[in-house]
Image (cartoon, rainbow, N blue to C red):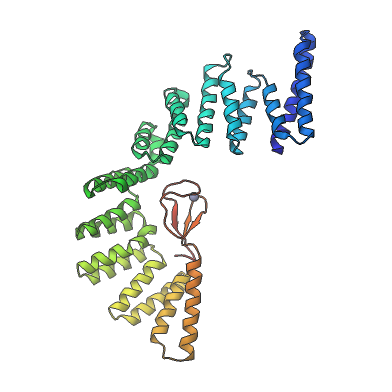
Amino acid sequence: MLEILFLLLPIAAGYGWYMGRRSIRQSDSQKSKKLSRDYFTGLNFLLSNESDKAVDLFISMLDVDDETIDTHLSLGSLFRKRGEVDRSIRIHQNLIARPSLTNDQRDIAMMELGKDYMAAGFYDRAEEIFINLVSQDEHSEEAETQLILIYQVTKEWQNAIDITKRLPRKRQQALKCTTAHFYCQLADEAQNDNDKIKKLQQAIKQDAKCGRAWLTLAKIYLDAGQFDLCKHAISELKTADIDLFADAIATAKQVYRDTQDPDGYQELLAKAIAEGAGASVTVALAEHKISVNQHQSAETMMLDSLYRHPTMKGFQHLMKLHIKQAEDGQAKQSLSMLEQLVEQQIKFRPSYRCTACGFPSHGLYWHCPSCKQWGSIKRIKGLDGE
Ligand SMILES: [Zn+2]
């Protein structure tokens, strides 16, 4: 509240002075008296700690003309950012009602009013305003961007896609990851596998690096028993987004088990590790080696990996290997206790983090709940992660 009062005080004081001077010149003493009265009433409100009333009064004192329109717009935007949307709506509606506004000024005020409605959750009213503004050349791109935001909240994915198609080519390129996720959302909502696959293929057409589409395709093909297509999708995922490969381990393990191809599975994991897949994939490969009685190879690989990229996950798995081989006794008990402590620490810490805003999470979200970016949440790298 304080910064608004600081913003308003000089305006109110300056305006009082200006109106006083002007009214003397124009002999408009009536208006001057009213303004002075309003100004002192406002000051009284301030002094008696009724700052809400003071703000409202000062706003009503501001006449709308070419010189003050920017002040109105700044105030409106400030109120919206502070969550006082009812005030920003009032300011912008007040602006739009003035017949003296030019068309461009009215469009700017409408854009702001649309944003107020969005902030207040009146999406239908905001949508109506932005649809009208889309036809105004100077404001169409901003209005389209706002419409895309609305359709994400209301989960109208096809509408969001249709709007992105109208954007200039450069903006479309910048939004290709987002658009691909819209197609993935449509795939999630589709009723049958054929429709799902079509939408996912459209997602890949938009953004060849959309790992989510390849990951979902791999799962659909596995469930449908189309093992070759499933393996192909996993391999494409590895090329498209190596960070996401760890999330495909369960699907990969299943498909290579169903096709009785343990060597193929081992080769796939080894390739993924060479291409930069993290500690989870190394642990999966070590577990696989142990299951085919390659204990020594598993241990050497874990040690080698820990030397190059020390991680808590790798360290815990190496301890597990040692516990299995240790003879019963005090040393084995201590090692087990230590391993459990490390496991608890790993569980306690988040595994994923948004690369855009830093939001930490234990699960994989496609849409960051904090900064609302698509595909920005990745597995954490470094000692605590991959
Ligand atoms: Zn984020």
Percent position of residue 27, x then y: 78, 7
Q: On screen, 301 above or below 239?
A: below
Q: Residue at x 23, y 48 (%)?
A: 192
Nearer to us in this view, 214 or 197: 197
Percent position of residue 237, x then y: 31, 56
Percent position of residue 270, x then y: 32, 68
Look at the image and tell me whether residue 366 can be seen. Answer: yes
Nearer to us in this view, 322 or 301: 322
Q: On screen, 328 above or below 45?
A: below
Percent position of residue 302, x then y: 40, 75
Nearer to us in this view, 370 or 49: 49
Relative horizontal placement of residue 29, taking residue 197 as reference (left or right): right
Q: Residue at x 39, y 86 (%)?
A: 325
Q: On screen, 123 above or below 93?
A: below
Q: What is the tally of numbered marks visible in this picture? A: 0
Q: Residue at x 40, y 36 (%)?
A: 170
Q: In the rendered image, which quarter is residue 326 located in?
A: bottom left
Q: On screen, 266 above or below 354?
A: below
Q: Quadrant of the C terminus?
A: bottom left
Q: Quadrant of the N terminus?
A: top right
Nearer to us in this view, 134 or 51: 51
Look at the image and tell me whether residue 383 can be seen. Answer: no
Q: In the rendered image, which quarter is residue 96 located in?
A: top right
